[in-house]
Amino acid sequence: MGMSVIISVASEDDAEQILKLQYLGYQSEAELYDDWAIEPLTQSLDSLRAELAERHVLVARLGDEVVGTVRGLVDESGVGRIGRLVVHPRMQRHGLGGRLLESVERQLRGETEVTAFELFTGHRSLGNLRLYARHGYRQASVREVSRGLSIVTLSKPAATALAA
């Protein structure tokens, strides 16, 4: 009998596992953009602990192991900002990223009235772009950060998220 992946609110006790997972998960992004100084790879444990106190952070657990995570917050304009969606490489392409995305949307809607959801990824991160499109996100803007990197911001109305 196999174990099920359970999604729940992260606690401070999860910080080290989240940071390790984040480091593992963002290796492919760093390689894709040839940039090993991206913030997810350089974030400190203290900085992550501060985020745990300020944001909604969810984890996906397989037994005691954190195999996925996502963060979100609702800004002053009512936009649910979602970030750092990470799934352990061995768990990818099984729907866990989509489950985490839907879970953080529900969590943010439960906090306050949300008008829209917004997230971003790099222009070469095709798997991420496909995942977000499958969940109703559409390109809102593209901002060139450097010659090799453009940030694609995607959004969807919160009403779309309710219907999904």
Image: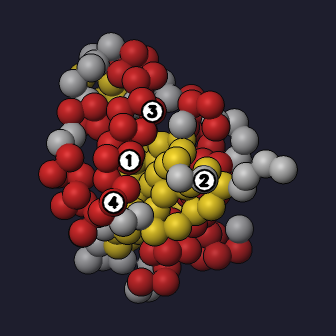
C-alpha gap between disc 1 and disc 3: 10 Å
Give the labeled residue for mark 2. 63
Q: Is residue 74 above or below residue 39?
A: below
C-alpha gap between disc 4 and disc 1: 10 Å
Q: Look at label 4 and name its amino acid.
A: Asp
Give the labeled residue for mark 3. 25
Q: Look at label 3 and name its amino acid.
A: Gly
Is residue 59 among what the camera can see? yes
Mark 2 / mark 3, whichever is N-terminal: 3
Q: Is residue 149 above or below residue 77?
A: above
Q: Where is residue 160, by image quadrant?
A: bottom right
Give the labeled residue for mark 4. 13
Q: Which mark is residue 27?
A: none
Mark 2 / mark 1, whichever is N-terminal: 1
Near mark 3 (Cα within 10 A), the count class, few <14, some 14-19 or many ≥20, is: many
Picture coordinates of residue 102, whole percent (x, y): 60, 63
Q: Which is in the foreground here, disc 4 or disc 1?
A: 4
The kind of secondary structure element at disc 4 is helix
